[in-house]
Image (cartoon, rainbow, N blue to C red):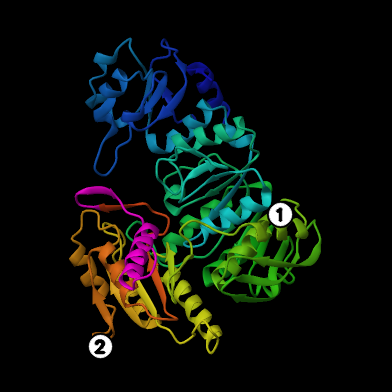
Amino acid sequence: MSKKLSEVMAILRKSDFSQNEIHWATPELNPSLTGITQDSRRVRPGDIFVAIRGNSMDGHDYLSQALESGAVAVLVDSAMISALDLESFAGKISILTSTDTLESMASLASAVYGQPQNRVDVYGITGTNGKTTTTYLLESILGQSAVFGTINCRIGDIELDGGGNTTPLSADLFRNLNQAYLRGCRNVIMEVSSHALELHRVRGIEFKTAIFTNLTPEHLDFHRDMDDYFKAKKRLFEMVRSDGYSVVSVACEYGKRLFSELATRGRRVLASGPGARELSLNRPHTGWVEPLSWEMSRTGIIGIMGWSVPDFHEGSCNFSSPLTGEFNMLNISGAWAAALSAGICGEEIAGGIAAMNRVPGRFDTIQGPGFTVIVDYAHTGDSLANVLRCLADLRSRESGDATGGNGRIITVFGCGGDRDRTKRSVMGKIASTLSDHVIVTSDNPRTENPDAIISEILQGIDPGFSAEIIPDRAAAIDHAITIAGVGDYILIAGKGHEDYQITGAGKIHFDDGEEVAGALRRARARRGEDV
């Protein structure tokens, strides 16, 4: 696939979202384009290189490297023109300018890849927690789909390069949208982070359905406050196409607020979760999806889902899911509503829900000798509380049966470095309030001192509470399993699916699940059991 630069510029001139923001400074050079990237290390012959000024690096410093790697065009900041030695590039490379290269990169990437977002149905999921599980549920219901999110970007088992972000940067995103289309996918399900919305990564995409899961404190190192965070999330719902739907979980106050604002503007919106039916009464163009009854156990959730969808129908359907926890009931409700908006019948939705039995690193259960280990990505106060309440609920249901029911909840967790510091003491308080014993350890300390992070976590833990400090995460996991008894639950929280740890020394391989398996082998060996 290649396009002449003149073809790309013609597409931009016709695009509603380009606003003629990109100026072609060297129209006499009209190269064939094969791709686009903002990373000079990934430039391939025929690419456009986009120079972006970041907080710690400036892409304009790497123009020569991009040219040497085969870039045939560059997009540079118009304010940098006078400072750049462009004479050395004369006749060698075509030059484009923009007042905001980060924002313009989305427009340019869309055009380079032939506006692939218009050839597929795009479902966008945003919220603090639950995005990944919702994407997996929706994929199971819809069938062959491309999935872009926290764990990876993939089409089935074929993994695409997403650059390691929850929502890929626009150059990667539009390339992957094009790959999805070329591989026969007509549905793309993507997690849309607040960063992606603020930094224009999804610019130019009209979503078939946008889904809101919840909003709780997170990324307050990036957003000024929770209201700013909410407004960033709300932008997704301004990008829903005219025949599309918005799905809003109304289990939190921000969900109720978003539903009300969208309904007041006459948008087609479905409320999901407990209270959805009542909230949508007497509101035109709105509908609801709500569990009419449900119950959970160690083995999953069973219940009856009810709904009423504008321009579709009302109904109810029995369902079962191998997932457990009230938080997953909310995820199931949101995915169900999105599927209804796509015209899928209840029985087919129930089949997809039943078939989705695991999301990597989300409430992964590993059975120990008499106790249970849970590995979960919970890395915010709300997500940690959700998992711990689920474990407390399961423990209370088991009280008096053969599994124990009177065991302890032991939580192993830390907090990431170079990230929102306000949540550290909050997570410490939540862990100590909802656990019987806490082991505070390292997460991804990055460039921060792990001991300093732990000290901030400890500010939320009562000095008299049963807590230990073991900065080495592997040693902390091993210790938790060593002290576990019959009926205990051990929660290893914060990293989930991640197979690495980032420290000041760099990125190393580290997998919580592997560490648990190793610790269990050692524990069995100490007991003289076969391993």
Q: Residue 454 lies in what quarter of the image?
A: bottom left
Q: Secondary structure at mark 1?
A: helix
What span is colored magenta in the figure?
503-531
| Residue located at (57% from left, 27% from top) | 114
- Asked whether the viewer can see residue 425, the reply is no
Residue 409, placed above or below residue 311: below
- Circle 2 is placed at which residue position? 464
**Amino acid type for the residue under numbered disc 1:** Ser
How packed mark 2 is, by other alpha carbons closer than 10 Å (few <14, some 14-19, many 20 or more), is: few
In the image, residue 61 above or below residue 88: below
Amino acid at the residue labelled 2: Gly
The verdict on residue 252 being magenta is no
Label 1 crowd (10 A; few <14 / some 14-19 / many >=20): many
Question: Which image quadrant: the C terminus?
Answer: bottom left
Which numbered dot is residue 341? 1
Q: Is residue 507 magenta?
A: yes
Say whether residue 451 is left or right of residue 203. Answer: left
Residue 189: x and y in percent read: 58, 47
Residue drawn 24% across the image and 24% down it: 84
Q: Position of residue 279 (x, y in %)?
A: 67, 72
